[in-house]
Image: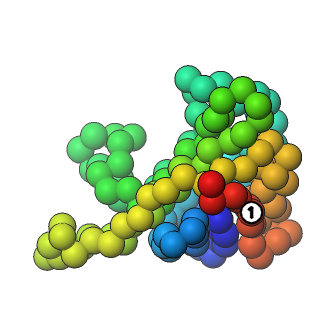
Amino acid sequence: LRMRLEEDGDGSAQLFVEASCGPYSGAGSAWFAVREVRDFGRQLQDTFPIPAESPIEMEGGFWSSTNRGSLEERHVGVRIYPIGSNGNIGVRVSLATPIHHPDRAEAQSSVSFELRTHYEALRSFGAELEALAVGRSDVAELECNAS
């Protein structure tokens, strides 16, 4: 899982995400407030254990103009949750291309899969995300197991 950020100068940035797991791979991007990326990184560093009923999530894409706070079209989604009780962590990555009018819904490309990792790698990734958000790094990467 690899993320990089291109800031717009107004507190927002486009987050570019690349992920691969076994034969599956994909890339996508979405706009976020830079503070959202920073806070997500901090949450990954500070949350132990991650409650099964309350996964850590970040998602972006086209937001609904009529239903405030809900995504109409998700382009980047990352959900982090525990797998069992032995310290394994699941990272569900969902990536999709945007659909613009007059594109057909079937023209959208998407990929979704689970990566597996552990708390220490997740903590390091959170620190890299925070560094990315404050401009101290160009990329944040999380190495995962495909199984």
- Residue 57 visible somewhere in the drawing: yes
| In the image, residue 138 above or below residue 129 | below
- Please name the amino acid that badge 1 sits on: Glu
Res 22 → quadrant: bottom right
Q: Position of residue 120 (x, y in %)?
A: 85, 46
Seen at 56% across and 23% down, the residue is 53
Quadrant of the image occupied by residue 18:
bottom right
State which quarter of the image contains the C terminus: bottom right
Residue toward you, 56 or 83: 83
> Residue 2 location, x and y as percent?
67, 69
- The residue lying toward the viewer, choosing from 76 and 133, is 76
Q: Quarter of the image holding residue 13?
A: bottom right
The percent position of residue 32, horizontal first and vertical second, equals 55, 58
Q: Horizontally, is 85 left or right of 146 in the view?
A: right
Quadrant that contains the N terminus: bottom right
Mark 1 neighbour density, 10 Å: few (under 14) some (14–19) many (20 or more) = some
Question: Circle 1 is placed at which residue position?
Answer: 143
Residue at x-position 32% and y-position 56%: 73
Please tell me which residue is depicted at 17% across the width and 76% down the height of the picture: 103
Compared across the picture, whether 61 is left or right of 133 comes to: left
